[in-house]
Image (cartoon, rainbow, N blue to C red):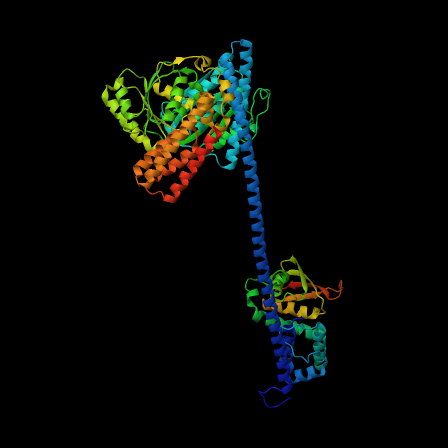
Amino acid sequence: MPTVEDDRVSRRRYQREQRARAEAEELLENKSRELFLANQKLSEYSGHLETAVLERTTELRQALVQAEAASAVRTRFVATMSHEIRTPLGGMLGMIDLLEMDEDNPEKLEFLKNARISGQALSRIVNDVLDFSKMEAGVFVFEDEGVDIRALIGSVIAMAGANLISEGRMIESKVDLSVPPLFFGDATRIRQVISNLVSNAVNYSTDGIITVCAKSTPHAKGILLRVEVQDFGIGIDKEQLGNLFKDFSQISNSLTAAARGTGLGLAISKRIVEGCGGAIGVDSTPGFGSTFWFEIPAEVLATPQIVEAEHTLDEEFAETFSLKGTRVLLAEDNAINQKLLLTYLDRMGVEAVLAENGRIAVEKFEPGLFDLILMDVAMPEMDGLEATGLIRKSADLKDIPPVIVLTAHVMDAIQEEASVVGVDTVLCKPIPFRELKAAMIKTLGRSLMFEPVHEEASVPAVETLVKAAPRNVTALMSGPMAEDLLLMFSQEDLSQLVSKYVADGQETLTKISEAHGLGQAANLRENAHYLKGSSLLMGFNRVAALCTEVEDNAVDISASRMLGIGQEMSDLFSEILDHV
Amino acid sequence: MKGTVFVELLKMAEDAFGEDVVDSVLDKADLENDGAYTSVGNYSCAELMKVVEAFSEHSGLSPEVLQRKFGNWMHEHFAQNFPEFYKDKDGSFDMLEALDGEIHVEVRKLYPEAELPRFTTNRKSDNHLEMVYSSPRPLVGFCHGLIEACTANFGETAEIERGETEAEDNCTTFQIKVTS
């Protein structure tokens, strides 16, 4: 052992420490490398994950697109099929109606009635399927219009009640005073829901009264309308309540055999009500009956005088009334429309006096001479609104008959002005026969005769006309108008009318081109509107659409677009003539 | 075997016998890396046995005694360097019971490949703990020394007995009885 403290360490000790240090450093480096590699692996893994997620997302998106496409194809197929079924069905029902009119043999009448009931049932089913496929496809559009719930419930009950009276059953309506006379909503759809609920109540009960109640409570949007349909039928078990509003579901029981349908009614009703922002439900006690109800929020409509006639009075309801002997002043400048409307009026048994424009209408008007005035809006010399104003000033208001305005304008554009001059009802072209008649009945609204259907429709041998009619040209027309025209006119008459329309249209088209060339916007607009009116009434919707485009853009439509429109219209006219 | 054990063993030897003695003992012992150990390294347990053997020969103390002394030394090292493990422990039993469940868990976070002994404890009464030690290495004496130091660290006096028969190699049951 050294006697003196020595701070220095031996060479071997130093070398040993160096060696230990080198080992430690190597270990450290290895550890660092391992960490780096581990980190790299993690990053790679995370990258892989992101790629995998992206790939999977792409795959899913593709699958979704494919599924949606498949669904759209299916829906389109159903819609097309429904339409294809509906068209011949409509024809059959029409034929049955015509046969019923001419038939006196009670036995055959009974057969025809049964055929009609079956046809109507089938028609309902097809309509349900069509509605449903529209909803599936997301093309089910709600409209906003004035709804008169009292008239609406009345017409539903009138329809359903006709079949029940013979069974000694009753349907009654209780509309609370809190319900406003008019509110915004989709009358057709609301009617469909009520009709569905009433028809269910009828099908699922054998006796007892059926009650339709409506009341309203304040709501942020205006009012919350609640409609209830109560029956004292078989009722529904608790377990079945949940499935009730599902697609294609039906409560099965001894009565189901009697209850027809697709099981879509409530599913469609639910979608309609929810589409209107409302709710639908049912309270039921088995053995005691059910109360189906729905609630929808609605905005109250303040000006009640202008409504679309078709929605306040059911078309079929209108058929039970006669307008025979009603005296009507018709102001219409378009020759085609004159012919068409006069034929309509003649079929209704109406005594019509024609005025070729607003000024002539004012001249021909005398207090006590007419029960109703039908007034076109856009006419030369004096338009329909001005004429209406003048007529109303010319005599005591009590001697002024109600006025129905017929227009190809968009409803909103004219509504306010029309209400100022005292128009009772505004109808938008195209106006099918029954819609016009319903509006006239509604507007007259007094001393109406109740007559059996077949006495009123006294057009001779309509079925032969339909057979002989030039089907080709009607194929170019929109559905409802074509149907009307086929019923109204003989082949010669219709050919003549169409030819006249084309000649008139070609002339007007020349005027349109000239007006555009001279930069006369007002003139251009006037002529386009004129042609639009007759095109709508004839059901040539594409021509009407082109006219609308010109009318709306009269000031700044480009020369090239004008040329294109002119060309397309010419082509359309040629096509129509080819089919006559 | 973790390098820190070797490093601490040589420190204890230096403390007891001086650097020169350690140097010459290491020189004489036939060691794989001539005794150049780092605490972050890993070395075979046989090497540790050789070092213990060499110092035993030099000092005349039995390997068993040396292991127990080293256990005491090592505990001192732990107590100074890892005081956080002692913070919430009231006595040696608490500490011994926490070896597997707490301390070895922390060791594995730093050295996932470490081969650790297992300690199974069974508290017979308030002052009697039975602990079964089992290890791949013949370090029973070392373990005994650690337990001794642990009880002393908490100011306790304890009797520590080893089971007479051992169920397997390097497995011992300690009966630890705290007397005051």
Q: Can residue A174 be seen in this view?
A: yes
x%, y% of residue B179?
63, 64
Looking at this view, is A330 or B146 the one in front?
A330
x%, y% of residue B28?
71, 83
Looking at this view, is A409 or A469 the one in front?
A469
x%, y% of residue A49?
58, 56
Residue A326 quadrant: top left
Q: Can residue A168 be seen in this view?
A: no
Q: Is residue A116 left or right of residue A224?
A: right
Q: Is residue A458 left or right of residue A67?
A: left
Q: Which residue is drawn at 52% across and 32% down?
A: A132
Above or below, B164 against A368 in this view is: below
x%, y% of residue A340?
40, 23
Q: In this view, does B25 lie to the left or right of A418?
A: right
Looking at this view, is A67 or A328 the one in front?
A328
Above or below, A306 against B114 in this view is: above
Callout count: 0
Looking at this view, is A310 or B108 the one in front?
A310
Above or below, A497 against B167 in this view is: above
Residue B177 quadrant: bottom right
Quadrant assignment for the N terminus of chain A: bottom right
